[in-house]
Image: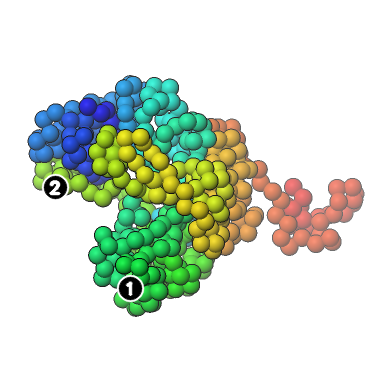
Amino acid sequence: MPKITLIGAGSLSFFSRLAADILTHETTCDAELALVDIDEQRLDYAGRIAERIFKEGGYTGATCTMTTDRREALPGTDYVITSLLVGGYDAIQSEIDIPMKYGVDQCIGDTLTPGGIMRCLRTLPHQAGIAQDIMELCPDAVLLNYTNPMSMLCWGMYRQAPGIKQVGLCHSVQHLIHQWAERLDVPVEEVDWQVAGINHQAWLYKYSRNGENLLPKMREVAVRPDIWLGDTVRMEYVKHFGIPVTESSGHCSEYSPWWRKRPELIEKYCPGGSWNGGSGFIKELYDRTDWEEQMEKMVSWETPVDLECSTEFGSHIINACEGGKPVIIHGNVENTGLIDNLPDDCCVEVPTYIDRNGLQPMKVGKIPMHGAAINQTQVNVQRLAVEATINADPELVFQAFCMDPLTAACLALDEIRDMVIELLEAHRHCLPAFEGKTLAKRPCMVGCTADNVKCHDDPGEERTEQGKEAAS
């Protein structure tokens, strides 16, 4: 009877999906689910939903425990699943609204951009703490992380908890493969494909059926108005670079400098429609005042949880590790020579074989050169954000923002520094490691000349107001 600890179990729908998936497998139908959440009300709902799933699915051998203390739950655990939100809606709102005031227009902001960097600062200490607790209390457990920013958090965890058995999970790869099978009208089970890169920006660079390369057909489909209008930015990637990218257009529009730097470009390439690039869409996702009502409906089975197993990787990984059917999933792991043309220590998304021997990431060699080059711009930000969080260093935070493609496309360094100062202040309540630390201002030299800014050893000369400000 495997023990599976779910940290962040009070989520509105994600916990119920994973719990239902886990119980569908013969190897885990009698699992012990240890539910952990710091919100007691949400935790109570999670427990009641679990018990309802047990009843409706006839899982008489499954059990459920609840606690607000993860260290109480972890001993004896075989698998840990994490899905965290640190700082709540207020943090999300400020990391979208403050950059917007400066001209940085984000759609989702949970992976890169100002929102992704701030989310790393406030979340990585908790994720790293979980990883360190696992290494102390259940070192053989496998950690399945569903929390964003995925690459930054996984990178930070294997930095701070060496030896942790972990994989970061996302659903974008399997969705992409099925989506293109539908667009090309081919049976997905007959397609031979290969995807690799980094999370939310992995590249589909092989897609064939019966020996026929289907990438040229993708390029034709990508410029059909009915397809382009519904997935604009991703189709622009196919049109110009020849290969599809995994995540939605809303996500993709934020990760590069081309789409969101001017209002007219946003209107043209990010026409809204939620995942297609709507400004501040993340706030719509998280501003759920009806969460209690929705969870009550799951408890009462007015809104029943689907008891059929989904395509989410989590349950299939656990089943394979427990001796069930081996699987190949796409996971986020440390690049230990897996992708030759990305840095060895970064976090990459690659095919990963899983059986009772555990996680076995597969080497893919080189990915397309232009795809790796685009990935590298993200990796630069991720590296600085992880270091900034580990060291609680405001200057490293600023440097991470400076390397962010969207921020750099919109703002000058003086503007970036001012924005970071404001963001750090707004998030101070959920950044305890930054207590007493501030990002220093720098003199703004715009408009200064040799005539209106005098040296300090020039007595009798009055500086202009602008010169005084610059010399302060």
Give the residue at mark 1.
Answer: 227
Residue 377 in view: yes
- Asked if 194 appears above or below 347 in the picture, the reply is below
Position of residue 187 measured from the top left corner of the image (x, y, whole percent): 24, 65
Position of residue 412 measured from the top left corner of the image (x, y, whole percent): 63, 59
Residue at (40% x, 58% y) in the render: 194
Residue at (10% x, 46% y) in the render: 302
Identify the amino acid type marked 1. Answer: Ile
Mark 1 residue crowding within 10 angstroms, few (<14) / some (14–19) / many (20+): few
Which is in the foreground here, disc 2 or disc 1? 1
Q: Nearer the viewer, residue 418 or 327?
A: 327
Q: How is the image coloured?
A: rainbow
Position of residue 23 measured from the top left corner of the image (x, y, whole percent): 19, 37
Position of residue 374 measured from the top left corner of the image (x, y, whole percent): 53, 60
The image quadrant that residue 315 belongs to is top left
Give the residue at mark 2.
Answer: 303
Identify the amino acid type marked 2. Answer: Thr
Provide the secondary structure element on which disc 1 rests: helix
Provide the secondary structure element on which disc 2 rests: loop
Q: Quadrant of the N terminus?
A: top left
Q: Earlier in the sequence, mark 2 or mark 1?
A: 1
Q: Going by the image, does 20 lie left or right of 415? A: left
Q: Which mark is residue 287?
A: none
Q: Nearer the viewer, residue 307 or 123?
A: 307
Q: Residue furthest front?
A: 211
Q: Mark 2 to mark 1: distance in Å? A: 32 Å
Residue at (35% x, 78% y) in the render: 224
Q: Going by the image, does 392 lie left or right of 147? A: right
- Asked if 247 appears above or below 13 in the picture, the reply is below
Q: Nearer the viewer, residue 37 or 469?
A: 37
